[in-house]
Image (cartoon, rainbow, N blue to C red):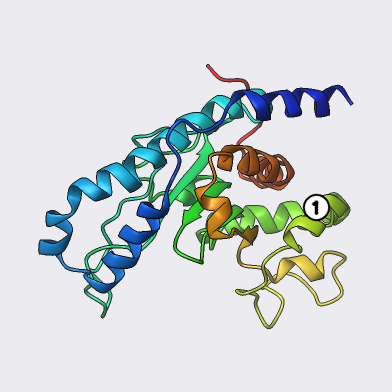
């Protein structure tokens, strides 16, 4: 009860100071139809005002909130926001810019890379802004093999504990369970079909999430909604980070 009271109080205390607006979504729609450097440079001020500035404000806001319920997670305006530039080195699509904006909150002991594209360093929390496709997510997506092996070994050692986390009634009602888009057809090497953790060991990613309406994404109360979702997601993030050797901790 005390925790619920503290949460309700925080929701009234921290409206976002610089919310996304219809201009934010308009910019992303226009970028999708004009995905070329000359157009972007001509509209860079719009990007700074309607995408980058409110995203940085949101990151700073969430970092303050994490100190209360997940102090091991970090929001850094210089690192948490993903770059707008696409990596086109190995892609047939040479469009230079992403048509969405996103940020990533990871463990403060994980390795960071400027630009926020090193999410494999830990499990974390994610926010994605895109017209009619915004969403919130958590976990770790397609981790490299050493990390995947650690997670699978931890699941195999205690499948009941992992099951209790991913099958939490509140989280399941909100997010529907683990995303299963990248499951193996067969059990990974070293595990039998009859293993007690068989239903989890074929996963290659461990993520949960839900779609956000444009109205939710543009609301001045977006941080309140993200905090509500993130609080339900943190147990999975903490379990995954524990499997990777990253423990819950206070801030320095």
Q: Is residue 28 left or right of residue 187?
A: left
Mark 1, other Cα within 10 Å: few <14 / some 14–19 / many ≥20: many
- Name the spot of residue 108 as percent of width and height, x first: 51, 31
SS at mark 1? helix
Q: Is residue 222 above or below residue 150?
A: above
Give the camera-side residue of 244 and 73: 73
Q: Residue furthest top?
A: 252
Q: Give left or right: position of 75 versus 30.
A: right
Look at 67% across and 67% down and name the residue there: 179
Residue at mark 1: 162
Q: Is residue 108 visible?
A: no
Q: Is residue 146 above or below residue 233?
A: below
Residue 8 place in picture, x, y as percent: 75, 28
Q: Residue furthest front?
A: 22
Farthest residue toward the bottom?
Answer: 185
Q: Residue at x 34, y 47 (%)?
A: 51
């Amino acid at each position: 009860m005390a925790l619920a009271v503290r949460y309700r109080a925080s929701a009234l205390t921290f409206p976002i100071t610089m919310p996304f607006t219809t201009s934010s979504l308009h910019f992303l729609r226009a970028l999708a139809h004009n995905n070329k450097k000359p157009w972007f440079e001509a509209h860079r001020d719009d990007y700074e005002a309607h995408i980058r500035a409110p995203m940085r404000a949101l990151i700073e806001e969430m970092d303050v909130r994490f100190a209360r319920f997940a102090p091991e997670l970090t929001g850094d305006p210089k690192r948490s926001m993903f770059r707008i530039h696409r990596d086109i080195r190995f892609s047939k699509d040479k469009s230079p810019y992403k048509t969405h904006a996103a940020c990533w909150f990871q463990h403060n002991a994980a390795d960071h890379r400027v630009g926020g594209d090193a999410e494999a360093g830990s499990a974390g929390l994610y926010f994605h802004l895109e017209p009619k496709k915004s969403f919130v997510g958590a976990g770790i997506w397609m981790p490299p093999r050493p990390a995947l092996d650690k997670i699978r070994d931890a699941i195999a050692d205690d499948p009941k504990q992992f099951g209790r986390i991913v099958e939490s009634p509140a989280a399941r009602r909100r997010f529907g369970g683990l995303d299963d888009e990248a499951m193996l057809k067969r059990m990974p090497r070293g595990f039998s079909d009859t293993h007690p953790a068989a239903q989890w060991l074929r996963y290659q990613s461990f993520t949960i999430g839900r779609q956000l309406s444009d109205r939710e994404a543009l609301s001045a109360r977006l941080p309140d909604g993200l905090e509500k979702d993130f609080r339900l997601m943190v147990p999975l993030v903490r379990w995954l980070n524990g499997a990777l050797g990253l423990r819950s901790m206070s801030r320095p």
